[in-house]
Image: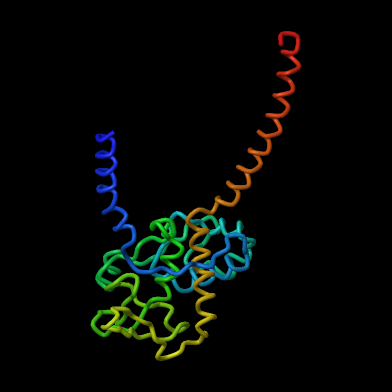
Amino acid sequence: MRKLSFMLALLTGLLSPVSGMANEGPKLDRAPIDPTNQASLQRGAKTFVNYCLSCHSAAYMRYNRLADIGLSDAQIKANLMFAAEKVGDPMTITMNKKEAKSWFGATPPDLSVQARAYANGPDWLYTYLRGFYRDDTRPTGWNNTVYDKVAMPHVLWKLQGQQSLKVDEKTDTHTLVLDKPGTLSPAEYDATVADLVNYLVFMAEPAKSKRLQLGLIVLLFLSVMFVVAYYLKKEFWKDIH
């Protein structure tokens, strides 16, 4: 019994640092995403193509997968294809990686599966895209409350406006203050970011909804077959039992 208690205490001690590490990091806001909302996904795709795809590629995503969110090939070609010729082409960019690194200090990552790169991917992205503030000490003039010393400039600043970071030294807390409004109100900007994150989550696994539907159909089929097999077994074995 003593040996068991010792092992439990040792295991608790080993796991405690891991739990502490899991709680570290910035507080994340809940991303109000809905993978079934095609209108939101379409708006998010438009924002992604217009503001993100110029620097970030999505090499594992093809334009024709946008048909899964209710867009026709004609709509994709007319509204979302600016750097490709065929609907089946991947979402790549022409920016040279070496030049991008010299401009930004780091190569912009591919965003194909960025929503799955973090434990709380959607919440991280939603908070990150709303957490930019002016910082004259940074090369781009921008910093971020989620990703300190971020190399990426705030590409959505015209929509959101310019925020500043107010730090309360007594409580060691910070607050973002909107100094210069953008073309969107704070609520409209949050909705735009939510649509963008919704699309990024879709792009990270375009077949997820169909996979879940197929899984449900398989489970229903197995349930029906279980009932049939059960009564068939009873019929075969009735003379023995």
Looking at the image, which residue sits at the far top? Answer: 240
x then y, percent, for residue 179: 40, 91
Give the image location of residue 236, x and y in percent: 73, 14
- Look at the image and tell me whether residue 202 can be seen: yes
Task: Report the label total.
Answer: 0
Q: Quadrant of the C terminus?
A: top right
Task: Report x, y in % for residue 39.
Answer: 62, 68
- Res 96 seen here: no
Quarter of the view holding residue 225: top right
Q: Residue at x 43, y 60 (%)?
A: 121
* Residue in front for this viewpoint, 124 or 93: 124
Q: Provide residue 191's location: percent of width, then percent of height.
A: 54, 75
Q: Which colouring convention does the figure follow?
A: rainbow
Up-down relation of residue 6 to residue 106 (above or below)? above
Q: Is residue 6 left or right of residue 206?
A: left
Quadrant position of the N terminus in the picture: top left
Residue at image point 25% right, 79% down: 139
Q: Nearer the viewer, residue 49 or 206?
A: 206
* Side of 193 where 102 appears, left or right: left
In the image: residue 106, left or right of residue 112: left
Identity of the residue drawn at 32% across and 55% down: 19
In the picture, residue 35 is in which quadrant? bottom right
Residue 202 vs 102, above or below: the answer is: above
Question: From this viewpoint, which residue is outermost toward the front?
Answer: 1
